[in-house]
Amino acid sequence: MDLTAAIDRLGEGGLLALGGLVIGAMFGFVAQRSRFCLRAAAIEFWHGHVDRKVAVWLMAFATAVVWTQALILSGALDVSEARQLAQRGSLSGAAIGGLCFGAGMIMTRGCASRLLVLSATGNLRALLSGLVMAVAAQSAMRGALAPLREAITGWWTIDGAGARDLLVVLGLDHRHALAFGLVWCGAAYAYALRSRLPWGMWFTASGVGGAVALGWLFTYLVSQASFAPVRLTSITFTGPSADTLMFVLDQTRMMWNFDIGLVPGVFLGSLAAALLFREFELVGFRDGQSMRRYIAGAVLMGFGGMLAGGCAVGAGVSGGAIFAVTAWVTLIAIWAAAGITDRLLDADEAPVVASPRPAE
């Protein structure tokens, strides 16, 4: 594809939005079919019952690492200008934001990406939670919660470039990163075999990671073909959800970009999968108590995601795949907070067990 001609016809923003729509649809379809969800994997892990959900998450994560690092080693991709590496970052924001996000993820029974995917299958709980999360994220970005976010962010900051690159910090290179991804791929395959994960879920879980690598590659190629500055990014949901909400409310103040196409793309891809496999079903709240829990969790996720600079996918997979220090801090904090919150709030629930279609 001649990206220069596409830019001349659509403009940088239009082309990025179209790419976000297509890559988002791919992600939404495979995420819905694989039941990809960090919250489900974390609960399974902390319950000491490592099974299908961990295998799916680990397969997606490892695939993203392998493909992203392979593209870098081949010379097809350069992520040095990505925000997670090039700009000044906050370790305090990553840690506290990750803790907030992990706790909120348990309370809403799904991370940001899972809420969007479930919304397209008719889950009204996920739809409301996703909207509240987007509002909270927008408030943390530019509204009433912005001063608190900025204060926490300033507690412990680190420079961009090498200081935010985990490979540089550890004295490693991209060959080591690729080897790391391959080792975890092997672990994911071992868990998948042991849990008798259906082969279709092997393919779709790997597709989740592939979509992340494709996001990095696409935005990089557009940046190389464009004369205007183009932000290098991949799949993430907290910031894009807030931007998409504002785009719907006031298009005059928003610009077309990858994020604006991503969110509706994921929704459409998940909707297509749900309709194709006859899994679309309207689901609501059981009572007012559960509704309050979901709303509080959504606020924590929206604020935490903006504070950390990424969500379970944006930091945990996209940022982790390029070995950004703050992304790894966020990912560890999300896993820790998920285990603690699950123990405090859902200690009486039965342990997670494998099933063809896990409870949402």
Image (cartoon, grey):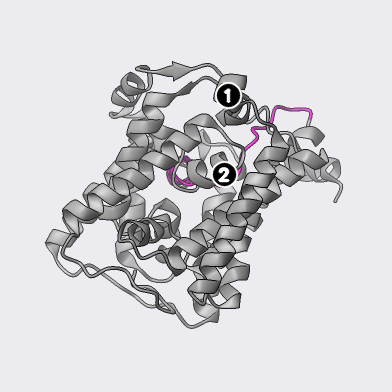
Q: In the displayed structure, would residue 325 be above or below residue 40?
A: above
Q: Residue at x 24, y 49 (%)?
A: 341
45 drawn magenta: no
Name the spot of residue 326 as percent of width and height, x first: 48, 31
Q: Residue at x 82, y 44 (%)?
A: 3
Q: Residue at x 85, y 44 (%)?
A: 5
Residue in the foreground of this view, choosing between 324 and 237: 324
* Residue 121: mark in rendering: none
Q: Residue at x 48, y 73 (%)?
A: 195
Q: Amino acid at mark 2?
A: Ser
Query: Image quarter for residue 199?
Result: bottom right
Q: Which element carries disc 2, helix, strand or loop?
A: helix
Q: CA distance from mark 1 to mark 2?
A: 19 Å
Decide if residue 26 is in sight here: no
Decide if residue 197 is in sight here: yes
Residue in the foreground of this view, choosing between 10 and 302: 302
Q: Which element carries disc 1, helix, strand or loop?
A: helix
Name the spot of residue 318 as percent of width and height, x first: 57, 44
Residue indicated by mark 1: 169
Task: Compare marks 1 and 2 and give the one earlier in the sequence.
Answer: 1
Name the spot of residue 339 as percent of width and height, x first: 29, 51
Residue indicated by mark 2: 318
Query: Image quarter for residue 186?
Result: bottom right
Q: Amino acid at mark 1?
A: Val
Name the spot of residue 30 as percent of width and height, x first: 57, 66
Q: Quadrant of the C terminus?
A: bottom left
Q: In the displayed structure, would residue 124 be above or below residue 275?
A: above
Q: Is residue 35 left or right of residue 221?
A: left
User: Where are the magenta residues, as a range?
Assistant: 227-245
